[in-house]
Amino acid sequence: MIDPIWSAGMGSIRTAMVTGASSGIGEEFARALAARGCDLVLVARREDRLKGLAARLAEAYGTRAEVLAADLAAPGPLAAAEARLADPDRPTCW
Ligand SMILES: NC(=O)c1ccc[n+]([C@@H]2O[C@H](COP(=O)([O-])OP(=O)(O)OC[C@H]3O[C@@H](n4cnc5c(N)ncnc54)[C@H](OP(=O)(O)O)[C@@H]3O)[C@@H](O)[C@H]2O)c1
């Protein structure tokens, strides 16, 4: 069966950036992607919560999760997140 997440345009890219991953719907989306074997770049301002989630997903699913603590309302951190997303050596979808 084709996983609907992968068939929705993610192609062969197996790493997804999830913004707002420190709580709520973003955290749940990160968990759902991890359960499907997806590696993650977790983005939000609260680094402690992102690190805790990354550790739990590594334990539960073997997920490799990068933590990118960033206030996306600020130009500098937003540019850092955009640069990570555009890095050709580490292809990532969002
Ligand atoms: N929950 C639902 O069922 C649902 C359904 C439909 C639509 N929505 C919409 O989805 C959005 C999220 O809802 P939620 O319930 O998941 O809210 P939430 O629990 O408050 O989560 C918001 C997330 O966004 C992050 N965030 C907020 N400001 C940020 C900033 N300046 N830079 C980076 N990250 C930031 C927060 O992390 P930090 O505070 O750590 O930065 C947090 O991870 C809302 O717009 C809501 O209206 C939610």
Image (cartoon, helix red, strand yellow):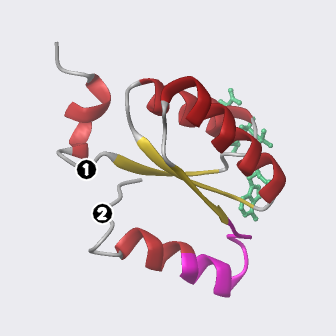
Identify the disc placed on residue 41. Answer: none
| x and y, in percent, of residue 79 in the image | 55, 83
Q: CA distance from mark 1 to mark 2?
A: 6 Å
Residue 70 part of the magenta segment: yes
Three-letter code for the amino acid on which mark 1 is drawn: Ile
Classify residue 17 as left or right of residue 47.
left
Quadrant occupied by the N terminus = top left
Q: Which residues are magenta?
A: 69-80
| x and y, in percent, of residue 25 in the image | 65, 33
| Nearer-N-terminus badge (1/2) | 1
Please give the residue where the numbered disc 2 appears in the rendered image: 91
Q: Establish if 19 lies above or below 58.
A: below
Classify residue 82 as left or right of residue 15.
right
The quarter of the picture where residue 37 lies is top left
Please give the residue where the numbered disc 1 appears in the rendered image: 13
Q: Residue at x 72, y 49 (%)?
A: 50
Q: Is mark 1 within 8 Å of ligand 1?
A: no
